[in-house]
C-alpha cells in the first residue's frame, strides 16, 4: 500500500487495517503468524515533513532461544516517524537524536506496507525466551530441562580452562 504525498488533505489520512505478511518476510525466520498484523496509522503533511504515527499489534508464535519450544509473542508497539523529501537529505558525519526517527521518500510516495513490516521486525528481541528463567536443553541428554528433571551430571568447569584457573589462583 503506497501513500501519495500530493493527495494528502489538510486533515491527513487515518488508516485502520490488517496487513497479511508472510513469515518469510520476518527477521525471525521460524516465526508464524497466529493473528495478522493490525495497524492504526495517522499520516499528516506538515510543510515538507510527513508525520506517520501509529500503533502496531500482532500475535506470533516464535521458538525460544534456549529450549526451542514455540511460545506466543504479542506485539504492541507505537511508532512516530518523520519523512522528508530525498532532496533534503544531506550527508553528515554524525547523526543527531532527532535523525533516528527520520526517513526520506523519493518518488512522492511512502510505502506503508514496507514501513509496517520494518516496525514489526524491530519488535523482535535479539534472543527470544519463553520465560526469563528458561533453563534450555540439557547438553547431555537433550531433554528440555523445565519439562523433565533429567538428572544428568553437567560439569561446570571446562578442562581446557584449568591451566588458566590454576594460573589465576597462584
Image (spheres, grey):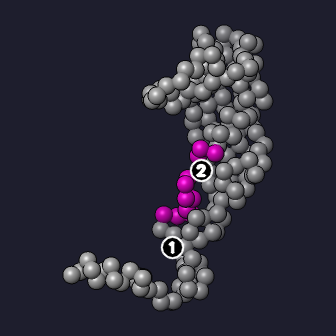
Disc 1 from disc 2: Cα separation: 21 Å
- The residue where tag 2 is placed is 124
Judge left or right: residue 136 versus residue 36: left
Tell me, yes or no, whether the two marked residues, 1 and 2, touch with CB atoms within 8 Å: no
Judge left or right: residue 76 versus residue 161: right
Identity of the residue drawn at 78% across and 48% down: 22
- The circle drawn on residue 17 is none
Residue 15, given in percent of the width and then of the height, sits at 71, 27
Depth check: give the residue in front, 13 or 155: 155
Report which quarter residue 79 is drawn in: top right
- Disc 1: CA contacts within 10 A as few (<14), some (14-19) or many (>=20): few
Identity of the residue drawn at 63% across and 16% down: 87
Q: Quick one: label 1 or label 2, which is nearer the N terminus?
A: 2
Residue 16, given in percent of the width and then of the height, sits at 71, 31
Magenta highlight: main SS: loop
Q: Is residue 122 magenta?
A: yes
In the displayed structure, 91 sits above or below 67; it is above
Amino acid at each position: 500500500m503506497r501513500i501519495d504525498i500530493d493527495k494528502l488533505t489538510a486533515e491527513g489520512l487515518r488508516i485502520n487495517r490488517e496487513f497479511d505478511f508472510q513469515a518469510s518476510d520476518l527477521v525471525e525466520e521460524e516465526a508464524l503468524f497466529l493473528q495478522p498484523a493490525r495497524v492504526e496509522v495517522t499520516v499528516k503533511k506538515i510543510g515538507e515533513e510527513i508525520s506517520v504515527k501509529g500503533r502496531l499489534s500482532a500475535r506470533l508464535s516464535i521458538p525460544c532461544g534456549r529450549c526451542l519450544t514455540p511460545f506466543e509473542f504479542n506485539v504492541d508497539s507505537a511508532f512516530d516517524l518523520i519523512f522528508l523529501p530525498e532532496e533534503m537529505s544531506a550527508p553528515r558525519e554524525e547523526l543527531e537524536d532527532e535523525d533516528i526517527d527520520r526517513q526520506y521518500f523519493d518518488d512522492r510516495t511512502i510505502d506503508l506496507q514496507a514501513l509496517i513490516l520494518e516496525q514489526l521486525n524491530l519488535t523482535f528481541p535479539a534472543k527470544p525466551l519463553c520465560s526469563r528463567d528458561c533453563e534450555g536443553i540439557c547438553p547431555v541428554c537433550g531433554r528440555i530441562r523445565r519439562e523433565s528433571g533429567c538428572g544428568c551430571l553437567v560439569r561446570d568447569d571446562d578442562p581446557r580452562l584449568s591451566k588458566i584457573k590454576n594460573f589465576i589462583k597462584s
